Each structure stands twice: as C-alpha cells, then as structure tokens.
Image (cartoon, rainbow, N blue to C red):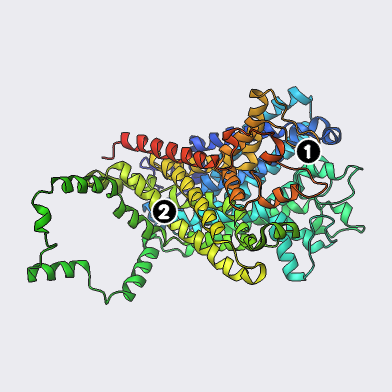
Amino acid sequence: MIKPCENGYLSLKMSWPSLAHKEFDELIRSRGVWLFGAVLLIGYYLSLNPSATVVKAAVGSNVTIGAFQGPVGFLVPIAAFVLSYRSIIGERESGSIKFVAGMPQSRSVVVLGKALGRWAALSVCVFGVFVVGAVIGATRYGLFSPLKLLLFFLASALYVLVNVSIATALSAATVRSRRALATLVACYFLLVLFWSGTVSGQIYTLLTGVDVPAYNPPASTGLFLWRRLSPISSYYVLTNAILGIANADALYNFVVIQLAPTQSINHTFVVRQVFDRPVPFYLAKWFSMVILAAWVVGSLFLGAVRFERADLASGPANSRSKIQTWIGGRFEWLPSMNVLRTARQRLGIPRSVPDQSRSHGSEHSSVDNGRRERFTRWLPLARKELAATLRYRSLWVFAVLLLVGAYLTSTPPEYAVAALGGDVSIAAFQIPIWLFLPFIAAIVSYRSLSAEQESGSIKFVAGMPQSRGDVIVAKIVGRTAAVGVFVLGSMCVFILVRTSTYGFVSPVTFVLFAFVSLCYIAVNISLATGISAAMNRSVRAATAVFGYLIVLNPYLWRLVALLISRRFSSTPVAPAGGEPPPNDILFLLRRISPFDSYTTLTNTVLGIANSDEAYFTVLRGFQPDSTPGYIVGEIFMPPIPFYLSEWFPLLIFLGWTLVSVVGGYVAFQRRDLG
C-alpha cells in the first residue's frame, strides 16, 4: 500500500482505507465543515427550549438530547450534499480522475473511500456539537441519560452516512457538477421537506384512490411504510424510539403533544393511535435502521456501477459536444460570420456607410455615443449569458417543479376561490416560486465567476473592453432573464390550462405578479453572483450560497427574528391567545428575508392583505373562529410605520441587490486575475 503522492494525485495502488484517510484529512481542515458545526449548534440552541410544558414533563432532562433531532434532520442533508457533491465529479471535470483508469484497484474502491472519508469528517463535527450541546443542556435541565445520548449520536452518524452516500453516488454518476448539485437540491426538496407531508400522500392517493386527510389518516400499513421510506422519516422513528417516545415519523415534541389527553385528532401518524391491531414488522421501530442501511448500500452500489461504466478519458466535455453537434447539424445551412466577413471584404463593401451630414460637426454626438457605449457595453456579455443559461437542464427541472407545485396548491378552500376568483391560478405560483426559486438561482449562479477563477479562464477579462463591474452586471442580467423566461412560461402554460376551471385572470394582477417575481429572481441571482465573484473556489461559493439560504429561509430566520426582537424591544413577543403582538421590530425583521418580502409583495398584488405569510394562511385568518396571523392591518393601529407598508419590501429587494453587487465587485476588483 502506497501513500498519496505529494502532487495530490493518487499513487499506483491505494486501498479504500488510505483513500478515506486522505478525504478525511482534506475535509476536516476545510472551513465548510466547521461552519456547518456552528450553524448546527445555533439550531440546537434555538430548539433547546420547547414551549409546551407537556414536552418537558414527558422527557424530563432528556430534552437536552431531543433538541438535536430537528437540527440534525434538516441541516445534515444540506451539509452532506454541499460538501460531497464534487467529491468525484470535481476531479473528473479537472481531468485528474483520469489517473484512476490506470490503477489496479476498481473504481468502486474510489467511491467507497471518498464516501467513508467524508462521512468520518462530518461525524467528528457532529460529535463535537453533541458534546458542546450536552454541556449547555445539562446546565439548564440537569443530568440526562448518557446511554441515550450515545445511541442518539450513533443514529445521527448513520443518518450522516446516508446523506453522504447519496451525494457521493450522484457525484460518481453525473458528468457535470452543476447537474449533480441540481439533482441533490431536488432530492432535498423531495426527501426532506415534502416527502412525508405532501408527496407520499399524493402518491398513495394516486395509486389507491383513497384520500389522505391532514387529520385522522387511514389505517393503511402501506401508507405508513411509504412515509418512512424517506431517510429523515426513518431517522425520526429511530430517534423517537431512543427517547422512549411513541412509534411515529415526526419530531418528538409534536408526537408528545399529540399524545396529550387533551388532543382528540391525530396528525402525526402515531402508530398506536391509528392501528388497533398488531402492525407488520416493517412498521416496527427497529426496521427504520434497515431502511437507512438500504439507502447507504443502494446509493453506493448504483453510484459505483455508473462510475465503473463511465468513460473517464473523454471527460465531461463529451456531453457538451453532443449538444453543439446537434445544434450545428440543424443550422449548418446558415453561412458563418467568417464567410460573410470574407465575402464583404472581397466585394469591397464597407462595414457601414458614414453619414457625412452627421460627421461634420458632431462632437456632441460622439460624446453621447461614448456615454451610451459606456453604459451598454455589458449587453453583449449579457446576451451570451442568456443564451448559455437557457441551455441548462436544471431550468427545465425547475419549470416542472413550478408546475407540479402550482398544481398541488391550485385547489384552495372555497373562501380563497371566493376572494380571488380567476386569480387563484396566479396565486398558485406564490409558494412554488417563493420556495424553489432561491435554490435554482443558487444552482445557476454560484459558479458563474468562481469556476472561471478556478480554471483560469477569467484571465481573459483583463483584455476585454468591459470592466469587471460590467462582467458582474452582465452575468446577473443574463441569468435573471433566463430564469424569468422559464418562470413566465410556466405561469402562462398553467393559467391557460386552468382557465376552464377558475375563469380568466386579471391582466393587471398578472403583470404585477410577474414584475414582483422578476425582482425576486434578480435579488437571488445577485446574491449568488456576488458570492461567486468574491470566492475563488466553487466549493467555498457553494457553501456560502447555501449557507445564506439556510439562514434566510423562513423556517430558521423567523426564529432568529423572534430572538432578536425579544432582546431589543420592550413589547412582549410571546403571542397571547395565538395572536402576534404589535411588535414592529419583529414584523420588520421577518421581512428582511427576501423570502418573506416576496410573500408580502405578492399578497399586496393579489389584493389580500399586508402580510408576509402564504396567501391561503392570510385568508384563513379572516374566517370566523380564526386568529389573524401576521397581518399588519389587524395587529397595528393607524398610523402604520412606513417600513411596514405594503411596498417597502421593494426597497429591501433593492438593498439586497446593491449589497450583493457592490460587495462582489469590491472583492472581484481587488483580486489578481493574472
């Protein structure tokens, strides 16, 4: 067994333990791992104080252990995907993976070694967070069960291995890093966010014809097993068993509240509350370990098989050449620009005929042309970015997700249809765009400049007439236009199809909704491009981009806004009777996130109310026997502060865009591209 060479390439023979050790050493020194540890610790601290007394009474001091469940469940997949998606495809794109073809060991060893090495590094980080979190929790709630903490960590380590295996397998199976990342983002939405709540129920209804209501689900073993096929659901089942909670695939505090005597409905799929008979073995608590192990083995096996069959000598450019050949074969009848230029020169045709009347005494026109050229010289680059981005397959996947999301949310309650009429077809896009767009913007833009800095092709910028600021602006404009084409196209197709159901939409509402959506696109493209300009490595850019998506995501940002408002405001923020307090700092902090600014603006366009919540949530708050949510007009007495007005989020959008562009420009301007 020979150790890795000094140049970073693998030696002639290396076993998987040596490769795993090499991957562990590289990843454990990276900033991304410890940034993930810091975010995980913050998430743990925010989850450490359950609001319900019944939760503290049920688990006692083991609240310290249970607080790890939610942060690990949601954050580990993001960290594993971001830190592992280029583990193999990155070397394949750079060309260094070609050395694998000449090694005596199989390529499966490479897949296994990289997966285990990165799993070990992430597990060490998670272990450190567990130690620090346990100390914090013990000082607040007293001593807990050390055995349960150890078992909880082992279950979490298995969950880390599942997600690292999925990312490594996709990295081995794909030919481009952008495609691998886009697939992993789709996996996160499908398996982590939507599987147990939406996707599994929709598929079950499609296959059986039986509806799955939000409350009191049917006693179907197939439905319960279908929900647990997601890694996060199996992780919840396993960790709930360690905590001594009921057999359920939801967060432990939700399950405890569900089991309280005052609850009369079941919405957390607790097995003992649904089934009055013994359940099959595949619904037992221990079977969740089998599901998690199957994810590990299946992912690595499929990734290794695909990697064994890959042609490493041709490189990733082969797929791009197929596209270029396809395009060239269909447009080869057109004369090339070189042919036209040669013909013009032989015939003596001038490039342009000067206007003598304007050439004599037009110093002012030349000055005007110079100014115009200075402000429009980024346009050719923007057109190039637009044409290149429109070819991304990830945008087609994004369009499909938008249509599917709009379809799933296009059957609102009757009071929503009565309030919006035909504009329900427009409102159906609020949540899909709000949720999916920031991630697709990150995918198409996080390598817009960092990849060129990595490869060295950015050096050509120094010899171009455009400035570095022009390059940043061109990339933002071109990619914003490309994403906007898919968003507007999806909306038009869906609205045309649903017109027969809900009637015609208001043209004014459609135009304003499209304008707000384009602003939302520009903000997210600017954030990702600014970060890409400031980073000289794609891995760092991906970590930073998805880091801000985690922090600004409403699920986490609203908790952060709550904590900040508690510290800096004298108005109590604990809701009384479920109604939010008139705390202007809390309302403003929530809207600083581009996510909530978008929902505020689209609710205004739809004519609903001044609120940052989803449109159907706002309309439900106006119904009898309902408590209004974060609706400014219902919570605050006039006069309302200007920073809580309906259109103030446009200034927030502008602020995010300027900060991103200026920050990226300053960092990009200072970098030595030579």
Whole-number angstrom distance, CA of label 1 to CA of label 2: 42 Å
* Disc 2: which residue: 479
Q: Nearer the viewer, residue 545 or 474?
A: 474
Q: At 8% from the left edge and 51% from the top edge, which residue is drawn?
A: 360
Q: Residues within 10 Å of mark 1 (few under 14, many from 20)?
A: few
Q: Secondary structure at mark 1?
A: loop
Pointer 1 and pointer 2: residues touching (CB < 8 Å)? no
Q: Where is the C terminus found, in terms of image quarters?
A: top left
| Label 2 element class | helix
The tag earlier along the polypeptide, 1 or 2, is: 2
Looking at the picture, does residue 147 appear above or below residue 407? above
Q: Nearer the viewer, residue 252 or 217?
A: 217
- Mark 1 = which residue? 578
- Residue at point 92%, 57% (across, down): 276
Decide: is 144 above or below 239.
above
Under mark 2, the amino acid is: Arg
